[in-house]
Image (tube, helix red, strand yellow):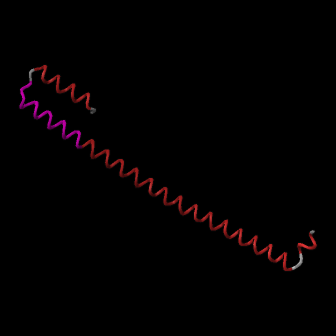
Amino acid sequence: MDILQVLFHCYYLIYLGIDMGSLSLFKSQENRLFQLATVNQQREFMRYLRDLNGWLERDVHDRQSELRGIAARVDQLRDDLHDIRTQGGLAQLG
C-alpha cells in the first residue's frame, strides 16, 4: 500500500466520522503493514545482493581462469620462438 492509499484511507475514515481512538488503531495497523513491507523489501534486496555476489564471484573465477590460459599460451609461443631462434629457424625462414 503506497502513501496515497494510506492518506485516502485516513481521510475516508475521518469523513465517515470514525473516532480518534479507532483512527489511532487504524494508523497503528497501517504502520505495522508499512513495517512488514519494509522488512520484505529488505529481505528481497538482501537476496538480490547475495545472488549478485555469487554471480560476481563466479565471473571473477572464470576471468582468472581465462587469463591463466592466455598466459600459458603466451609462454608457449615465447618458448616456441626461442626454440626457432636457437635452432636457426629464423635464418632459414628469411
Question: Is residue 45 placed above or below 84 in the rendered structure?
Answer: above
| Front-lying residue, 68 or 89 | 89
Quarter of the picture holding the N terminus = top left
Residue 20 belongs to the span the image colors magenta: yes
Q: Residue furthest bottom?
A: 86
Left or right: where 19 falls relative to 64: left
Q: Quadrant of the C terminus?
A: bottom right
Residue 16 in the image, given as x and y percentages of width and height: 12, 20
Q: In this picture, is 19 found above or below 69?
A: above
Q: Nearer the viewer, residue 67 or 30?
A: 67
**Relative to 65, is 41 on the left or the right?**
left
Going 25% across and 28% down the picture, which residue do you hit? 5
- Please give the count of numbered marks on the rendered protein: 0
Q: Is residue 66 magenta?
A: no
Q: Position of residue 76 (x, y in %)?
A: 74, 72
Is residue 16 rendered to the left or right of residue 67?
Answer: left
Q: Is residue 19 above or below residue 29?
A: above
What residue span does the magenta drawing correspond to? Answer: 18-35
> Measuring 19% from the left and 36% from the top, which residue is drawn there?
30
Quarter-of-image position of residue 81: bottom right
| Spot occupied by residue 58 in the image (x, y as percentages of width and height) | 51, 60
Residue 77 x/y as whole percent: 76, 70
Q: Residue at x 32, y 49 (%)?
A: 43
Question: Which residue is rendered at x = 35% and y = 47% of the image?
Answer: 44
Q: Is residue 78 above or below residue 33?
A: below
